Amino acid sequence: MSGLARICAARGAQVGGSDAKDSTLLHALRQLGAQVHAGHDAEHLRVFSDPHPASCVVVSQAIRESNAELRLARELGLPVVHRAQALAALMAGYHAVLVAGTHGKSSTTTMLAVAFQGLGLDPSFSVGADLNEPGSNAHHGRGDVFVAEADESDRSFHHYRPAVAIVLNIEEDHHDHYASLAEHIDSFETFAQRVQPGGALVVSADSPAARELVARLAETAPDLRIVTYGEAADADVQIVKIDAQAFGSVTTVRTAEIGEVTITLRVPGRHMAHNAVGALTVGVATGAAPAAMADALGGYRGIRRRFTVRGEVNGVSVVDSYAHHPTEVAADLATARNAISPGGRVVAVFQPHLYSRTRALGADIGRELAAADVAVVMSVYGGREDPIPGVTHQVVAHAALAHGALVRVEERWSAVPDVVSELVRPGDLVLTMGAGDVTQLGPEILARIATRREPRQDG
């Protein structure tokens, strides 16, 4: 939402809005001239609408019908527009590049934006996360390329008409909108069929459900150009080797047309290497030279909450992760394991996100969480959802225990920093994980470790 506001303001529109609480993000929007407020109040809309009535009110799925500003907008007869519709309108007239998939959208979108900037294209972009500083999640560029995430969570990505699109993977998620994996594939098929004539669809060859999508499209969209990438032997752009390092990777890819190309990343994780190969494939489909695109991808330095190092004190590192799905948890724990020194341990602090996701995937998350040496499981972050009877953090904790994890359950958010500071010892890596307010714990944990009288030396 804030990215849309930035682009609209940069194009000269009068922009207003509100968020639940004040933040550096709101401050950044105010610097652009936007009238943004902390807290939701109908008066915010009244002030903004007089003497210049708003042309529309943009909302996301996170906004409930009970929201005071939304209620007033409907009473005034103002058009209420979903954020995806607004983004589609902003992309009109541009060479739209859309990034879709269950995991990796923000990272891959940012990789493309950074690479296209490095190639001098000055793209517009909208990302679901900040790059290196608050308010860096969007840009109104002078070039004709517009890169954005295509969010499948509520099927709103069906509003887009991309020139080039990528499907990174397809897995079950968003259980408040999808009843099965088959429904996810159906939805991605609809999205893929909206690629413009003469455009291209890039698809991972390593995701079983994405391969099913390719098979379907061969029947339902036979004229659509599809390019696959991945480690699979039949991938059009094949990953030959990934040299995963503590905080980076070197990946070699090969195609019949361009031979071998190497991508050197300064962010860790095999999943990030896969995302970079997907970005390379998209760049080539957009017209970039392969070697130049590979070099430009080396400029990517990561985004907030994607294995972001928060600091180190007394020999203990603290890293923050947005992982809230079993596949993401597994990937980031593997990355953490690769980053620690011999003798060090991975201490995961996990906050389940949404009751519907915890009910559907909590046991799978717990199974993956068992890869940590120690797991601290917090209460469910409900977000936009009301509690579901019988669905608690214990679903995750019991599954982790059943798979051999050493688990500590802590329901009180405020108690977690002290709990973690007593658990860790020099050489450990603490990984805060989840899509809720667990991200705010990193500095608190570091502060508690720093004030502890003597760092633990034993287990």
Image (tube, rainbow, N blue to C red):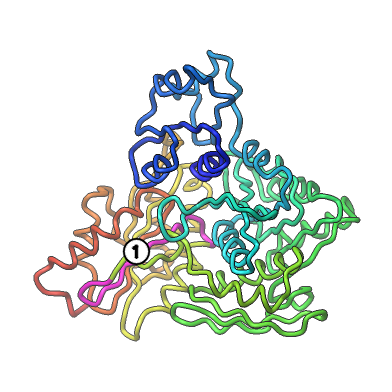
Quadrant (top left/top right/bottom left/bottom right) for the C terminus: bottom left
Tell me if residue 186 can be seen: no
Can you name the residue that lies furthest to the left here? Answer: 453
Tell me if residue 163 can be seen: yes
- Residue 388 pos. (x, y %): 44, 36
- Residue 403 pos. (x, y %): 43, 66
Q: Residues within 10 Å of mark 1 (few under 14, many from 20)?
A: many
Q: On the image, which quarter does residue 158 sit in?
A: top right
Instruction: Decide which of 377, 237 is in the foreground and name it.
Output: 237
Residue drawn at the location 69% of the way across and 69% of the way down:
206
Residue drawn at the location 46% of the way across and 44% of the way down:
354
- Residue 159 pos. (x, y %): 70, 40
Q: Is residue 184 left or right of residue 361?
A: right
Q: Circle 1 — which element?
A: strand
Residue 315 sits inside the magenta stretch = yes
Q: Amino acid at mark 1?
A: Ala
Instruction: Decide which of 228, 86 is in the foreground and name it.
Output: 86
- Residue 326 pos. (x, y %): 51, 59
Question: What range of the chain is rendered magenta?
Answer: 312-327
Q: How many marks?
A: 1
Relative to 212, does residue 34 appear above or below in the rendering?
above
Relative to 67, does residue 13 appear above or below in the rendering?
below
Residue 329 sits inside the magenta stretch = no
Residue named by callout 1: 375
Relative to 8, does residue 241 appear above or below in the rendering?
below
Q: Is residue 110 left or right of residue 24?
A: right
Instruction: Decide which of 357, 339 is in the foreground and name it.
Output: 339
